[in-house]
Image: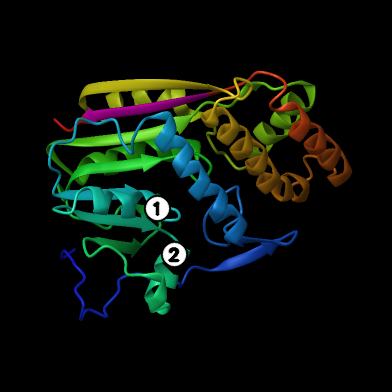
Amino acid sequence: MGWFRRSSTTTQQTGTTGARFGWLRGRKRLAEAPYLLPSDFVEGNRLDMQHYLLKLAYSGNYIAPLQSPQSIVDIGCGTGRWAREMALQFPQANVVGIDIKEPEADVAARQVADLGRLPDNYVFVQGNVLQGLPFQDATFDYTHMRFLSLALPRGGWPPLVNEMARVTQRDGWIEILEFNIPTGGGPAFEQIQVYWRALADKFGMHPGAGSAVKGYLDGAGLRNVQERIVRLDTADRSRTARMAAVDLYTGLASSGPAMIAAGIVPKDEFDRLYAQVRDDITRYNTIWELHAVCGQRA
């Protein structure tokens, strides 16, 4: 892949809106990827809010000891917000976001000039990361991925982490941020989590992969592996706790259509439990554990 930087006269784009979609109970979904959540405007807003939650929880966008990275890639970049922020934070770096769908913000910035330009050192590449990464060996000196466990089958973890190592330069950093399944939260939350786990099992996903990430990086032969764990308690009344509560119950709402369609829970039962969850999630101590792990390619 040749590096691409935008200029004031550049019109070329590598992004495309060619992903295929379907609909499930009124929510737009990707038709060509095993993602358990919708892919629509509502979900995009949740993911952007989640970005700021993670940034607040970890006091920044990364934990790896970066100095002056020259090439950065975000695997499964979603709305592209992390990648665009990194492009602004490290203007000397070429930053690539890859996902099966072009971020809506990228499309809008390209089509509506008044919305502003994308960073000159940021580019989106469309691709299905489950089929490998379309980059040459040792392309990047920082390779990043976060919260992809709802799109990545359990057996796909080792191959993808090995791919991340392959495209990272020697001594470059790989970083993955994932979560553990929340605990506590009251009876309704605990019951809806049972249904949520059943949905993930039905599609072979590995939600709550946070505790396993360090093992995946060790298994890929990385060195200097470091882990930073953050425990969020939705009842502690902090700003981070309030954001975590919103992220959790809106995420459950997004997964509801898939649970219902899969026959895991009747709609009226899901609606009853979800209404209770919204009331309970800040009253009970819902503990959500995040695992950020980074390591260097040997």
Where does residue 234 sit, x and y in percent of width and height?
Answer: 61, 25
Stretch in magenta: 289-295
Where does residue 178 sit, x and y in percent of width and height?
Answer: 44, 32
Residue 1 vertical placement versus 162 (above, below): below
Q: Does residue 102 appear anywhere in the picture?
A: no
Q: Is residue 292 magenta?
A: yes
Task: Kindly identify the amino acid type of the residue bearing the numbered disc 2.
Answer: Ala
Q: Quadrant of the C terminus?
A: top left
Classified by dominant secondary structure, the portion drawn in magenta counts as: strand
Instruction: Rate crowding at label 2 as few (under 14), some (14 to 19) or many (20 or more) other CA atoms within 10 Å.
Output: some
Where does residue 51 sit, x and y in percent of width and height?
Answer: 45, 43
Instruction: Rate crowding at label 1 as few (under 14), some (14 to 19) or many (20 or more) other CA atoms within 10 Å.
Output: some
Between residues 93 and 199, which one lies in front from this camera angle? 93
Residue located at (56% from left, 48% from top): 46
According to the picture, the residue beneath numbered tag 1 turns out to be: 81
Q: Is residue 17 magenta?
A: no
Dot 2 or dot 1: first in sequence order is 1
Where does residue 1 sit, x and y in percent of width and height?
Answer: 19, 63
Is residue 122 rendered to the left or right of residue 192?
left
Q: CA gap, disc 2 to disc 1?
A: 8 Å
Circle 1 SS class = helix
According to the picture, the residue beneath numbered tag 2 turns out to be: 105
Whether residues under marks 2 and 1 lie with C-beta atoms below 8 angstroms apart, the answer is yes
Residue 109 vertical placement versus 220 (above, below): below
Is residue 132 rendered to the left or right of residue 6?
right
Q: Does residue 167 appear anywhere in the picture?
A: yes
Residue 67 vertical placement versus 293 (above, below): below
Residue 47 vertical placement versus 116 (above, below): above
Is residue 93 rendered to the left or right of residue 257?
left
Task: Kindly identify the amino acid type of the residue bearing the numbered disc 1.
Answer: Arg
